[in-house]
Image (tube, rainbow, N blue to C red):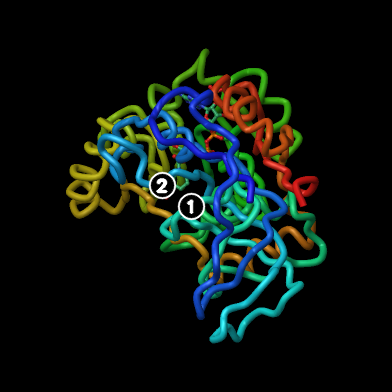
């Protein structure tokens, strides 16, 4: 099969399209013919070998094929598979399952997959497993957002943020979306009540307080964030700088014990079936519409990563594998 392979950390040009062995499913696995995947920030971290990207492989990549989102068709099933049959349309998150979705096929533990609703295209389904699930968990974890609550999403124009804005609106919140000026019109069209250009204003330095802050690009320590919360408010760091991650992770939990406000990291729970069902419900009502900025073919994966790195996109960048079949 064809796959985008890399054997050393570096710029997108280290990704090479190569012929590799098609995986053989184990007894509990299905072989998925991949129809679409999408790029996430984690792929870029692992490609470049940033501090976080090297956690799985200090000197060279531990996983030579990147990609966590998968949507496709079951091509073969292992002898113990009970949930799926050949021809079923499925999707899931392969974080923690060896990644490797920038390829034509992947053998997957059947428990990691959900049946793709007919109402979703393969391209749409590929936007959900990583970004959609963490977005949903950021607004529904511990306690759901209630109608009228003030919610701020920082980095709202990205893959995760564009979903979180729509989900928070679906829960009835008053939503502020923060990102670069060119992305703000889209955020308004997705339902954001208020938008903020992070190059002009810094929400941590303003007086407004929120019931929930979801920060995809946290750069500060927990004290700045706790000051921006209402009583019982929650701040979730989804992504950001390593120093912020350490400070929020360590001191945020101490501050949270001493206060009714909570500040902490949110680690996604991939493939949570309850969350996926709720997300599918929102999509079927069209309350949630995946924002796909651009699709690239597997052969053009270098260009796709280069485009991701510019930051000049709104929503998701999808790898469309349909023609590779
Ligand atoms: N905790 C978890 O389990 C988990 C799971 C999935 C993802 N994540 C993390 O979540 C984060 C977001 O993922 P994503 O896929 O949505 O990334 P993304 O698509 O790259 O979106 C990030 C957005 O933030 C904007 N941005 C950059 N710097 C900013 C700043 N200083 N203030 C406000 N906005 C800023 C970016 O715009 P420009 O680049 O154009 O400025 C972009 O629109 C990543 O760090 C990712 O690693 C965490």
Q: For the point 81% across and 66% down, which residue is it?
A: 118
On the image, the x and y values in percent for residue 102 come to 59, 45
- Splitting the image into 4 quarters, where does residue 237 fall? top left
For disc 2, the neighbor class at 10 Å (few under 14, some 14 to 19, many from 20) is some
Q: Is residue 266 above or below residue 79?
A: above
On the image, the x and y values in percent for residue 270 come to 48, 60
**Is 217 left, or right, of 320 in this rendering?**
left
Q: For the point 67% across and 55% down, which residue is it?
A: 34
Q: Nearer the viewer, residue 131 or 96?
A: 96
Query: In the structure shown, which secondary structural element does the residue marked by tag 2 occupy?
Result: loop
| Number of disc labels | 2
Mark 2 sits on what residue?
63
On the image, the x and y values in percent for residue 251 come to 19, 42
On the image, the x and y values in percent for residue 119 come to 82, 62
Q: Nearer the viewer, residue 100 or 284?
A: 100
Mark 1 sits on what residue?
99
- Splitting the image into 4 quarters, where does residue 191 fall? top right
Q: For the point 74% across and 58% down, which residue is it?
A: 283
Q: Which-is-in-front pick, marks 2 and 1?
A: 2
Q: Nearer the viewer, residue 175 or 37?
A: 37
**Alpha carbon separation for disc pair 2 and 1:** 7 Å
**Is 64 left, or right, of 92 in this rendering?**
left
């Amino acid at each position: 099969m064809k796959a985008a392979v890399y054997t050393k950390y570096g710029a997108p040009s280290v990704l090479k399209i190569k012929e590799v062995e098609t995986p053989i499913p184990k007894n509990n696995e299905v072989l998925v013919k991949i129809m679409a995947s999408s790029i996430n920030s984690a792929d870029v971290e692992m490609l470049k070998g940033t501090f976080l990207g090297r956690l799985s492989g200090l000197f060279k990549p531990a996983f030579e094929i990147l990609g966590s989102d998968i949507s496709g068709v079951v091509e073969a099933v292992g002898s113990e598979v009970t949930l799926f049959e050949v021809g079923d349309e499925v999707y899931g998150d392969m974080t923690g399952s060896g990644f490797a979705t920038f390829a034509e096929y992947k053998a997957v533990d059947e428990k990691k997959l959900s049946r793709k609703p007919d109402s979703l295209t393969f391209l749409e389904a590929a936007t959900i497993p990583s970004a959609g699930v963490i977005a949903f968990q950021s607004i529904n974890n511990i306690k759901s957002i209630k109608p009228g609550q003030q919610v701020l999403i920082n980095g709202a124009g990205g893959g995760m943020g564009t979903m979180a804005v729509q989900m928070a609106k679906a829960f009835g919140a008053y939503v502020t979306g923060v990102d670069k000026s060119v992305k703000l019109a889209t955020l308004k069209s997705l339902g954001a009540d208020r938008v903020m250009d992070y190059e002009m204003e810094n929400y941590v330095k303003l007086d407004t307080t929120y019931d929930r802050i979801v920060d995809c690009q946290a750069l500060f320590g927990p004290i700045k964030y706790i000051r921006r919360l209402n009583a019982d408010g929650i701040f979730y760091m989804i992504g950001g700088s390593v120093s912020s991650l350490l400070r929020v992770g360590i001191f945020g939990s101490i501050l949270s014990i001493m206060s009714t406000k909570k500040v902490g990291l949110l680690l996604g729970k991939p493939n949570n079936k309850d969350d996926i069902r709720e997300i599918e419900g929102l999509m079927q009502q069209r309350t949630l519409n995946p924002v796909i900025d651009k699709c690239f073919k597997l052969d053009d994966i270098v260009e796709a990563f280069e485009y991701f790195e510019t930051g000049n996109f709104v929503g998701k960048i999808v790898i469309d594998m349909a023609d590779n079949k």
